[in-house]
């Protein structure tokens, strides 16, 4: 019996790696594939609007997800049941939609956004909002040791959404219509797949609890994680917001094209460390500090190796390959491309250290670092972009990522010296 259980567990782990890799790859390359079609079916201005809409939708997505995924997946005891996570996600999801509408009203007034740009951003936010719903279920599946189910669902939903969106763009040549169609499809697919998973696997697991009180306590405890994830995403996209204010939609598209490999670094890093959240959390929970540290140091080494390979690849073949992908001449942006890819490596390190700090339950220490770097990004991005254009945007990005990785690497080491955080 023990042998069969071990074999089943190993099978689930292998399946989790495969499906999580496929789902993460599609999710990371979603905007890449969509942009490839947009640049051929539409024009550079439409591509620029899409780039901004996608960046804003993902910024508000951090509000909907509330930085809770790693906390939920590493809640191995567990302290909170699924009802608490679900109730909290209703609150954060509504906040995501309302805040995005308020931001759009402000942009329409101050930045004179045209109607099609407003609709594109609003619909893209709704389409990405389905990720917040899936995320809370996936965290529960991962907590139960079934990341393979989460990965399979994400792979099929995101993959089919890309196909539907790209087909709609080709047929309608309208970003607004294509995004509306993509939203309807991805929401319907998610609801049906969750119903099937509940019927077949009886997941997510539920526990007897007082959901309202637990949800409020959970929101309070994860507030630092939300602030950290929101500010991190703002820092990463501060150059895009500066470009939106100082340059053109065409420049926004160019920056989006050369910034794409940043996601490749993060994607490859996630392949390595995302499936390890639950196992290393269990190590820390049972007091295996040495094994925990060794596991994390291996991840650091892998991320550094991935970054080196990606920077070399960007320097050798980046501009021609990206130029072919996006049907645009990018040969004049080799230096900016390499700088952004290197910055992506530092971003992956910062995210790894943030995950480690969350696992040891010292997440309340995260916020100050993000606040300082976010203020610095806000203060420097517009002057740098106004003075140096897209090169200034890349300079701003890498500077912020270096500071973040250094800050949280030091903080993670300090947390390990402190020992287990307060879990209550």
Image (cartoon, helix red, strand yellow):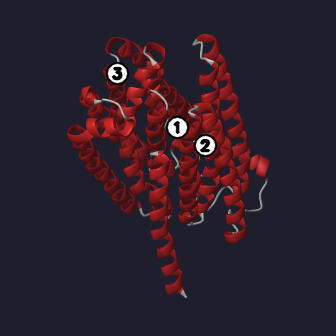
Instruction: Give the camera-side residue of 325 and 80.
Output: 325
**Percent from the top left, x then y, of residue 319?**
27, 35
Tell me the quarter of the image containing the N terminus. Answer: bottom right
Q: Residue at (68%, 62%) from the top-left corner? A: 204
Disc 1 is placed on an element classified as helix
Disc 2 is placed on an element classified as helix
Reading the image, the residue beneath label 3 is: 390
Residue 129 is at least partly visible in this image:
no
Mark 2 vs 1: CB contact within 8 A: yes
Q: CA distance from mark 2 to mark 1?
A: 9 Å
Q: Residues within 10 Å of mark 3 (few under 14, many from 20)?
A: many
Q: CA distance from mark 2 to mark 3?
A: 30 Å
Q: Quadrant of residue 209?
A: bottom right
Mark 1 vs 3: CB contact within 8 A: no
Q: Identify the mark at residue 65; answer none if there is no mark.
A: 2
Residue 363 is at least partly visible in this image:
yes
Q: Quadrant of residue 108?
A: top right
Disc 3 is placed on an element classified as helix
Reading the image, the residue beneath label 1 is: 229
Q: Residues within 10 Å of mark 2 (few under 14, many from 20)?
A: many
Instruction: Give the camera-side residue of 354 and 30.
Output: 30
Mark 2 vs 3: CB contact within 8 A: no
């Amino acid at each position: 019996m023990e042998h069969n259980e071990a074999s089943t567990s190993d099978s689930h782990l292998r399946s989790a790696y495969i499906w999580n890799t496929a789902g993460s790859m599609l999710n990371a390359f979603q905007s890449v594939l969509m942009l490839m079609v947009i640049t051929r079916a539409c024009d550079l201005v439409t591509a620029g609007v899409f780039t901004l809409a996608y960046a804003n939708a993902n910024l508000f997505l951090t509000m909907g997800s509330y930085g809770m995924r790693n906390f939920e997946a590493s809640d191995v005891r567990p302290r909170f049941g699924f009802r608490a996570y679900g109730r909290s996600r209703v609150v954060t999801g509504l906040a995501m939609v309302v805040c995005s509408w308020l931001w759009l009203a402000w942009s329409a007034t101050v930045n004179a956004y045209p109607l099609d740009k407003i609709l594109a951003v609003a619909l893209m936010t709704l389409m990405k909002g389905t990720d917040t719903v899936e995320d809370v279920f996936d965290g529960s599946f991962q907590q139960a040791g079934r990341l393979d189910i989460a990965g399979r669902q994400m792979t099929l939903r995101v993959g089919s959404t890309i196909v539907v969106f790209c087909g709609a763009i080709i047929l309608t040549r309208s970003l607004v219509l294509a995004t509306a169609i993509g939203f309807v499809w991805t929401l319907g697919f998610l609801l049906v797949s969750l119903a099937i998973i509940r019927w077949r696997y009886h997941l997510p697991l539920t526990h007897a609890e007082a959901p309202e009180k637990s949800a409020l306590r959970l929101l309070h405890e994860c507030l630092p994680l939300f602030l950290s994830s929101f500010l991190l995403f703002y820092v990463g996209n501060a150059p895009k917001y500066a470009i939106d204010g100082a340059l053109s939609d065409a420049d926004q598209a160019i920056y989006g094209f050369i910034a794409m490999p940043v996601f490749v670094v993060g994607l490859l890093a996630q392949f390595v460390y995302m499936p390890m959240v639950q196992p290393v959390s269990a190590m820390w929970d049972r007091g295996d500090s040495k094994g925990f540290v060794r596991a994390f140091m291996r991840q650091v080494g892998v991320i550094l190796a991935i970054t080196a390979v990606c920077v070399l690849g960007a320097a050798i073949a980046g501009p021609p390959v990206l130029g072919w992908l996006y049907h645009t001449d990018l040969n004049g942006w080799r230096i900016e491309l390499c700088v952004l890819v290197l910055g992506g490596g530092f971003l992956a390190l910062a995210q790894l250290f943030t995950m480690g700090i969350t696992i040891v339950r010292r997440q309340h220490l995260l916020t100050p670092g993000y606040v300082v770097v976010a203020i610095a990004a806000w203060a420097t991005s517009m002057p740098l972009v106004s003075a140096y254009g897209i090169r200034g945007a890349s300079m701003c990005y890498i500077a912020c990522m270096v500071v973040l990785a250094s800050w949280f690497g030091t903080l993670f080491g300090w947390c390990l010296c402190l020992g287990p955080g307060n879990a209550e």
